[in-house]
Every structure is written in structure tokens, then in C-alpha cells.
Image (spheres, rainbow, N blue to C red):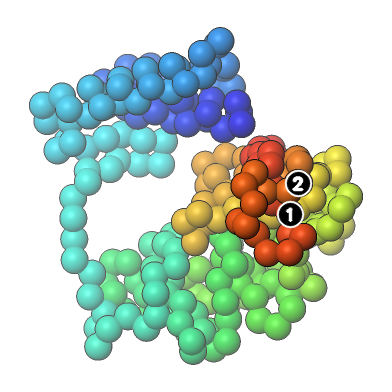
Amino acid sequence: MRDVINHLVGMNLVFVALFEESPMPARGADRLGADPAGAYRRSAAALQAAAARPGVLERSQATPVGAATGAERLIRPSHGSFDGTLSAVLDGVALFSGSAGLSAYSQATGGLLWHRRGAVLQGEDLVRNVLYVSKGSGLTGLNPRTGAAVRGTLVPAASSFYGVRAGVVLGLDTGSGGDAWGYDVAQRRVVWTTPSLPWPHYFVDLSGIGGSADPSSGMVLLAECAGLGAPVSAGTTAGNEQVCLRPELVAISR
């Protein structure tokens, strides 16, 4: 949990430096000290103060991936409406998931670029710019602009895979003694594993579009229960059902 808070504090300070045009904070430093909550509150207050400076939110911001202005633009499809629900945006392509499959639209024009019937979006590898979809029991990597399959990205039997980064898929075994592991798509083998995780454990996705896998780093969050037991008050569960008495977050650096 400390690593998660340290990451959030660091991102707050990155935006402070961006808005104030000052040097970026050192990467990998421990910014929490003996008071993690206080460090987070101070970084959040600094970010609010920096964003409140006159003209900050109206000017272009130079970033490592280019200049950002915050300007708004309405995007409309060439005919009718977008098919499905917005699931992700990658490489200038807006991806919509619906009952008929996955549709990709140009972020610049709103025009339909391609459609994959029956495909379900599973994640994006932002390092290698590959979109992963499932159809049946496996994963397939697609070029986000063309929808064409990317050679060497087929992952068979991918029901327990979550998120892809730099060609390595996060896998998670369920049940007592299960662990997390990384599967290299190109080599088609497991390249790292974690120690066994307390059960139950599961992949957390609060946003619905990859909230557990940080797109800017290799960090992944898993939720686990370090202790099961009877409910604190009687009548809150049915029969002999147990509840989690010690919920925990596990940060995995992949």
C-alpha cells in the first residue's frame, strides 16, 4: 500500500512541476517518510495551488509525449451514432464495445476505421502500441489503426490473463496457493512469478478500462484477503459464510 501512495504523491508532484515549469521530481524516491497521509495531503494541496495560478489551465503544457493545450473538440461519427460504449482510446483511435463486437473510430474525423465482430477488448500494451482482444478462449494483438492482427501476439487459453505491458501479460492463478505471473507473448513462456497470494485474491478494475494496471508504469494492483472469519455482528451473512477481516492491496512491479 505504501508503494501505491508513494506513486500517487509522485504523480501529484509531476504535475506541480509541469504547471510551475520547474524541474521534475526524482524518479523512484521515497516521498512519504514517517507520515504517508501527510505527504499525500501536502502534495495534493501543492497541486491545487499550482493549478489555480492564473493562466495555467489555458496554456499549452510541454510533456515528454508532446504539447497539450486542454482544448476541446466535438467528435461525431460520419453517419448515425457510435456503435457501443467507449472502452479505450489508443494511438488516435477511439474504441467502442457493443453486443456486435468491437468498433474503432478515428479520433480526428469520427469515421469508422474497422470493426471486429464478436471481439471483446481486454487491454492495451501502451509500450508496444498493441491492442489485445479476446474471441473465444484466446487473446489476439491488433494494430489499433487498421485492426489487423499483429504477428507474434497470439495468446492461447487466456481466461486468467489481465493487462499487457511491453509484450508481457499478467496472469493470475485462483485458489489457495495461487500466484501472479508474467507471460511473454513473443517467447510463449512464463518469465516471472510472485510468491503465493492469500486466498481470495482478484484483479481490481475500478474504472472498467484497466484501473488496476497503471498505464504509465509497470505497477499492477491486486486485492487479497489476509484473513477470513465470522462477521463482526450476527445476521450479516447467511449460514456459515465467512467475510474478509483483513482486506489488503498488493502492488506488483512487472
Q: Nearer the viewer, residue 210 or 184?
A: 210
Secondary structure beneath dot 1 equals loop
The front one of 59 and 28 is 28
**Does residue 229 appear to the left or right of 93 in the view shown?**
right
User: What is the x, y in percent for residue 106?
Assistant: 35, 71
Q: Residue at the far top: name it.
A: 34
Q: Is residue 166 visible?
A: no
Q: Secondary structure at mark 2?
A: strand
Residue at point 49%, 80% (across, down): 102
Q: Is residue 228 above or below residue 110?
A: above
Quarter of the figure that contains the C terminus:
top right
Residue that carries the numbered disc 1 in the rendered image? 242
Q: Position of residue 117 (x, y in %)?
A: 54, 88
Q: Is residue 127 left or right of residue 80?
A: right
Q: Residue at 35%, 41% (x, y): give it.
A: 66
For the residues bearing labels 2 and 1, Cβ distance under 8 angstroms: yes
Which disc number belongs to residue 229? 2
**Which residue shows up at 37% across the image and 83% down it?**
83
Q: Is residue 235 visible?
A: yes
Q: State which quadrant residue 150 falls in.
A: bottom right
Q: CA distance from mark 2 to mark 1?
A: 5 Å
Q: Quadrant of the N terminus?
A: top right
Image coords of residue 173 (percent x, y): 81, 57
